[in-house]
Amino acid sequence: MAVMRVVLLSTYELGHQPFGLASPAAWLRTAGADVVSQDLSRDRLDEDAVRSAAVVAFYLPMHTATRLALPVIDRVRSLNPSARIVAYGLYALTNAGLLRARGVEGLFGGEFEAALVAFALHPSEVSPEDPRVDIETGLRVLGGPVARLTFITPDRAGLPPLSRYARLQHGARRLVSGYTEASRGCKHLCRHCPVVPVYGGQFRIVPVDVVLGDIRNQVAAGAEHVTFGDPDFFNGPAHAVRVVEALHAEFPGLTYDVTIKVEHLLRHARHLPLLKRTGCLFVTSAVESVDDTVLARLDKGHTSADVERAVIVCRSHGLALAPTFVPFTPWTTVGGYCDLLTAVARLDLVDQVAPVQLSIRLLIPAGSRLLELPDLQALAGRFDPAALAHRWRHQDPRVDELHREVAAVVGRQLTAPRRRVFEQLWQLAYAVADAGTRTMPVPEILADRTSVPYLNEPWYC
């Protein structure tokens, strides 16, 4: 009996070697499949592999990856009309209708590995659609259970070497970076988050031995730093503690970074010294805004005052806080954007904020909880398949024009020094606000500028 070939394709995963290929590859190979893993952000499509495949699976963890995948799906269909095509990941579910129209047969969400094995090797035993998805709308039914899997160590064979991916810039050093996940999903229901329509407030931990096994393999492949891609590393703080203690015991020289919500940084601040001691260099946090009205609309669970407290508590323990933002929303004002820049400067975060974070416009994907808000319903247009989102216009055209100009400034200078780009955005924002020339404030809470660590991947989402 011939061995079934499965081709796994990733189009974009934030500059990391794709965990979303490595994990299902391990499951499929264990089940006896011949797996070809391809990262199209680094290599051209292997057309011969596609022509010989029985199943081609696209990993769609985010908006950019999904938009990039659409023409590749069409290409795969033309190369191999008989192949069964499947899409998996957060954006597979929320774009179910669009993907089915392009010939995608299977759609699976967050805990996708077992479903992929069944779809590929035992098709009579699995529904081609995730049972938690409303087939008419493509939306997840919130409250439905998310699968509990017995995780195994990811298999990164066949992927490009780590040296071809994002590096950690730490002073004069550029460290080869790996990527893993110690948990999936999230306990929280932030309205704009793509995790929410799929997991609905549920999260799953990955056993410590599996996490360490994945890191061990990446260290052997040259990793000097590791990013934990969990939506929130402190969703399960006790588990997080076990992971970093085990990591540091085995690899005392390895550094890492994590993502943690503002409210968890404050609630679990007692664990921050441990993060620092075990090699954490910086903490990414989805701050999103410093406007309390916007934060309430997004249901973020923190206030602007909490953001300042989080900056202070992280610095007190020697950890850099790397905020992410969604500066342009239907509730943003020109003055509010100026206030955001002022807060970044006042808190001495200029060197810790990637300029692209100051250009992000609120995305309203299918299934977003944002559509629960009456004022947003009045602004949002119909779902646009080309944009993979509901389009919206600001009631003040100056805000949309400011966004276009900010995006242009950032887009032209992706590798420029952060402070130089920030100063240009500062002048631009105050010009649009017709507020004259303003001097940037002297920082009130000083950061250690000797070495601000960051990953050199400029894009986001």
Image (spheres, helix red, strand yellow):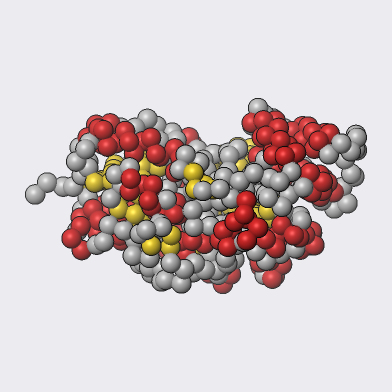
> In this view of the protein, which residue sits in the foreground, 441 or 312?
441
Residue situated furthest top in the rendering: 412
Q: How many marks?
A: 0
Find residue 175 and report its image quarter.
top right
Residue at point 52%, 43% (across, down): 14
- Confirm whether residue 461 shows in the render: yes
Residue situated furthest front in the rendering: 378
Reply above or below: 107 against 457: below
On the image, the x and y values in percent for residue 197 come to: 49, 61
Find residue 145 and report its image quarter.
bottom left
> In this view of the protein, which residue sits in the foreground, 177 or 100?
100
Residue at point 20%, 44% (across, down): 54
> In this view of the protein, which residue sits in the foreground, 409 or 164?
409
Reply above or below: 205 against 363: below
Q: Is residue 37 left or right of residue 407?
A: left
Residue situated furthest left in the rendering: 1
Reply above or below: 57 against 193: above
On the image, the x and y values in percent for residue 11 come to: 43, 39
Residue at point 42%, 50% (across, down): 95
Find residue 375 and report its image quarter.
bottom right
Residue at point 67%, 34% (across, down): 404
On the image, the x and y values in percent for residue 425 come to: 77, 35
